[in-house]
């Protein structure tokens, strides 16, 4: 092999190694930042991974909100009307958070099946429900009539 071909081969190989490294880093960053959505039924069945950041959503169960008197700790149940999951959150809940409304919580699922949330997202108007929650409730056949998600 002559010197010119050898030099071109090294350049092509260096480019391939560089592109492969860039793709690997991009995929690694995307994998770390992905938050998959799970319904309370999926969490109860054990389909949701533990100690991995996930999104869980549903309707806040009536009478389930328990606030700590001396801190910002809140515990409540989220249901898809088939199963329920307990969510613990420390912080100020959104103004629109209330019982019997759709929410999405982001956090990690503990070994005891309780989601330790670091963020709680509530609906932004009376008729809105997060799309994932609407889909999950439709699939379970428990979507209350007239409660369609608006974009």
Image (spheres, rainbow, N blue to C red):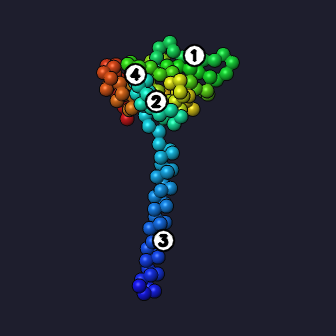
Image quadrant for the C terminus? top left
Q: Is residue 142 above or below residue 54?
A: above
Residue receiving disc 3: 14
**What crowding class fits label 4: few (fewer than 14 Cα within 10 Å), some (14-19), or many (20 or more)?**
many
**What crowding class fits label 2: few (fewer than 14 Cα within 10 Å), some (14-19), or many (20 or more)?**
many
Mark pair 2, 1: CA separation: 19 Å
Mark 1: secondary structure? strand
Residue at (69% x, 18% y) in the render: 70
Mark 3 or mark 4: which is in front? 3
Residue at (62% x, 22% y) in the render: 73
State which tag comes first along the sequence, 3 or 1. 3
| Nearer to the camera, 30 or 131 | 30
Mark pair 3, 4: CA separation: 53 Å
Mark pair 3, 1: CA separation: 59 Å
State which tag comes first along the sequence, 2 or 1. 2
Q: Position of residue 108 (x, y in %)?
A: 53, 32
State which tag comes first along the sequence, 2 or 3. 3
Residue receiving disc 2: 56
Residue 82, numbered label: none
Q: Position of residue 72 (x, y in %)?
A: 64, 23
**What crowding class fits label 3: few (fewer than 14 Cα within 10 Å), some (14-19), or many (20 or more)?**
few
């Amino acid at each position: 092999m002559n010197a010119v071909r050898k030099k071109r081969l090294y350049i092509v190989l260096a480019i391939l190694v560089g592109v492969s490294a860039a793709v690997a880093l991009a995929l690694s960053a995307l994998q770390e930042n992905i938050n998959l959505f799970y319904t309370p039924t999926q969490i109860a069945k054990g389909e949701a991974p533990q100690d991995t950041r996930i999104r869980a959503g549903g309707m806040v169960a009536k009478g389930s909100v328990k606030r700590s008197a001396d801190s910002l700790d809140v515990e409540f149940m989220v249901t898809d009307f088939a199963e329920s999951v307990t969510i613990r959150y420390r912080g100020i809940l959104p103004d629109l958070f209330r019982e019997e409304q759709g929410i999405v919580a982001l956090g990690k699922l503990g070994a005891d099946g309780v989601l330790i949330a670091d963020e709680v997202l509530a609906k932004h108007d009376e008729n809105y429900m997060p799309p994932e929650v609407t889909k999950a409730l439709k699939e379970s056949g428990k979507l209350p009539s007239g409660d369609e998600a608006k974009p």
